[in-house]
Amino acid sequence: MLEGRRIVLVEHDEIMGASLVQRLSLEGADVQWHRQIARALPAIRTPRKALDAVICDIRLPDGTGEELYDTLTRTGHPPPFLFITGQGGIDQAVRLIRSGAADYITKPFEMGAFLKRLATIIRPRADQDMPPETGISPAARNVDRQVAEACKRDTALLIRGASGLGKLRLARRVHVLSDRKAAPMIVCNALRDRVRADQLTQTVAEVGEGILVILGIERLDAAAQDALMAALSAPRFRLVATTGAHADDAAPLRADLISLLQSHEIVVPPLADRPEDAVWLAMQLFPAFNARRDTALSGLAATAEEAIRAHDWPGNGRELRARLMRAVEATTGDLVLPSDLFPERAANAPLRSLAEVRDSAERAQIIAALDHSGGQVGEAAKLLRVSRTTLWEKMQKLGL
């Protein structure tokens, strides 16, 4: 019933948590167990793989399940939530359902009834089985789903989005996954080059039964648009065009060309609207950049991930790639820090006290160790070469 499903459990009670993990694992689920909101929040907001459900106790040591859910809904659409509550928390659970949570179950409960509730809220795997290409957010997964659907069609396609969002990469995926993959794909860059009508006609002849990609189609002049529409009257080729998020300042497109393109359009949201995808993309890019170093880094500090999530990314993925490449090359520590990603901020920032620097570094290392150990404090203590008691004390001091 739960084979291969990825579930996050947020439960501080050791007995109940262990019981749920054991049963869910027996059902075939891949379970991450977190005891506190501080550990659960990043695991849900930026998972390494798409999550199918979150099981969450309403009463937690560092807050409530409602606070966790509300925090997640401020920046995106969380996975389906199944809340666990006592009789006294039913009103709160009902309020959460009205806010978009999937369901709740009251303690004590039969395991069979619990599993039925969980199975009910888990969505079909229609597009979750596809590996993420654009990101892990619902908006990015929707783009990937639309690209997959576009590969099955043969109509003209418009991909709209701001600069740096990988529109050409999406066009290449349409080509590779379509029935025209054996034929050529030719890219015509109207943004960079002044494309004449005769050049466009020649390119159409060269592409044959392949795919013609026109970058910045709004930059085609009237004569080139006329030539393109003439070729599209009885096309052997497929047209895939890209345009900016706002192309109002460009030359007007023919009405029939606009109608043709807008009938099948994919809009790629900016990275500023998808903070979890910004962190996901950084994680995808990091290994290749890290492999170029003589001494490998351990990864990105938790504070760097938060800085990535908070930045508005006007240059989108292109800016993130450039900043991360520079940060990995330039950092002198074991982790990429916010100052490596945004050195212009560090240059203007006031000097911090040594105590603040020490606390920040310890916090980042503890979070990294907890991530590596799956939230197991004993294992994290071994990785950090301190006693379990010492680690607990530092976690309490640092609010972890």
Image (cartoon, rainbow, N blue to C red):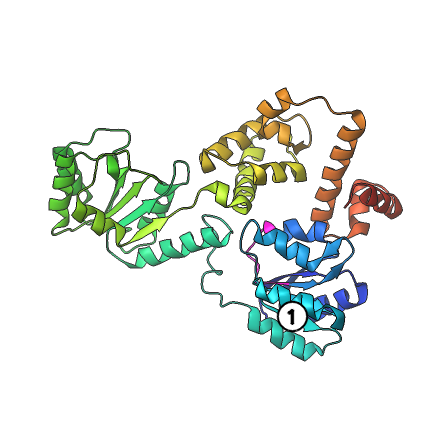
Secondary structure beneath dot 1 equals strand
Q: Can residue 69 be seen in this view?
A: yes
Stretch of the chain drawn in magenta:
45-54
Q: Which quadrant: the N terminus?
A: bottom right
The residue at 69%/22% (across/down) is: 350
Amino acid type at mark 1: Tyr
The x, y position of residue 123, in whole percent, is 51, 67
The x, y position of residue 71, in whole percent, is 63, 51
Rendered view: 341 above or below 241: above
State which quadrant residue 221 falls in. Answer: top left
Magenta run includes residue 50: yes
386 on left or right of 204: right
The residue at 68%/69% (across/down) is: 91
367 on left or right of 300: right
The x, y position of residue 18, in whole percent, is 76, 66
Q: Nearer the viewer, residue 275 or 175?
A: 275
Q: Which of 341 and 130 is in front in this view?
A: 341
192 on left or right of 347: left
Q: Mark 1 points at which residue?
A: 104
Q: Nearer the viewer, residue 151 or 278?
A: 278
Magenta run includes residue 5: no
Q: Can residue 5 be seen in this view?
A: no
Rendered view: 51 above or below 363: below
Main SS, magenta region, reads: loop
The x, y position of residue 246, in whole percent, is 33, 39
The residue at 77%/30% (across/down) is: 356
